[in-house]
Structures are given as C-alpha cells and as structure tokens.
Amino acid sequence: MAFLFVIRGPQNSIEKNTRNVFDLDFTLTPIKKLIIGGELNYGIVKTEKNTLNWNGFLLMSHCDITNYLGLTLRYGFFNDQNRIRLSNSIPEKRQAYTIAPTFAGYF
C-alpha cells in the first residue's frame, strides 16, 4: 500500500515564499510476521532569489520472532544542504539508526 501527499503554500502568514512538500509513504507485508514501511520526502521553497530544496527518507521493519517478542529496525536520513529546514547556518545531513526489541503479553 502506498500514498502520495502534496502540501503547498506559505510556511506562515508572514512569509511569502512558496513551499511545496511531496511525501510518499508505503507499507509492505511480504510475509505474515514481517512489516516493512517507509517514507520519502522532498521539499522545495521558491524565494525571490533562489529555489531551495531538501530531502529525506525513513525505512522501518518489524519482525515478530515469537507471539511475545519482536524486533524493530529503523533508519532515517535527512539532507538539508540549502539550510532551509534545520534553521542553522551550515549545510548538513543527519541520519539515525534504531534497533528496538518489542514485548507483548503479561510479565
């Protein structure tokens, strides 16, 4: 299953720059105990002088090992080379990794 979302307009009532965000989300269940999901983002801001952009994505998977124990893996990446979304003065890329056990039932 996949969905595409588009957001367009100014960031707030004061700013006159046109902002467009494209967001693609998906979920797959290739086998009964495995879920894979993701998100792809791309943003564009048009100012009077420039067209600036940013992008990022997230991938996640969860596997049920038993009825009570599972494991979730997640990776996220964000690229703000034009310094438009992270509100600082340096171009940067950020990434994050997560590994998390999940538990269900009574203890």
Image (tube, rainbow, N blue to C red):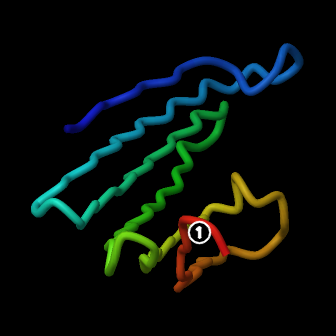
Q: Is residue 103 visible?
A: yes
Task: Quadrant for residue 83, please give it.
Answer: bottom right
Say above or below: 106 vs 97.
above
Tell me where residue 37 appears, x and y as whole percent.
33, 57
The answer to which image quadrant residue 57 occupies is: bottom left
Q: Is there any visible trace of residue 73 in the rendered image?
A: no
**Image position, residue 87 (x, y; %):** 83, 58
Q: Position of residue 98 (x, y in %)?
A: 56, 82
Front residue of 23 and 20: 23
Q: Is residue 2 left or right of residue 97?
A: left
* Left or right position of 73 against 84: left
**Which of 76/98 is in front?**
98
Specify the amino acid type for callout 1: Gln
Q: Residues within 10 Å of mark 1 (few under 14, many from 20)?
A: some
Name the residue carrying label 1.
81
Q: Secondary structure at mark 1?
A: loop
Q: To which quarter of the image does residue 32 belong? A: bottom left
The residue furthest front is 106
Q: Residue at x 51, y 40 (%)?
A: 44
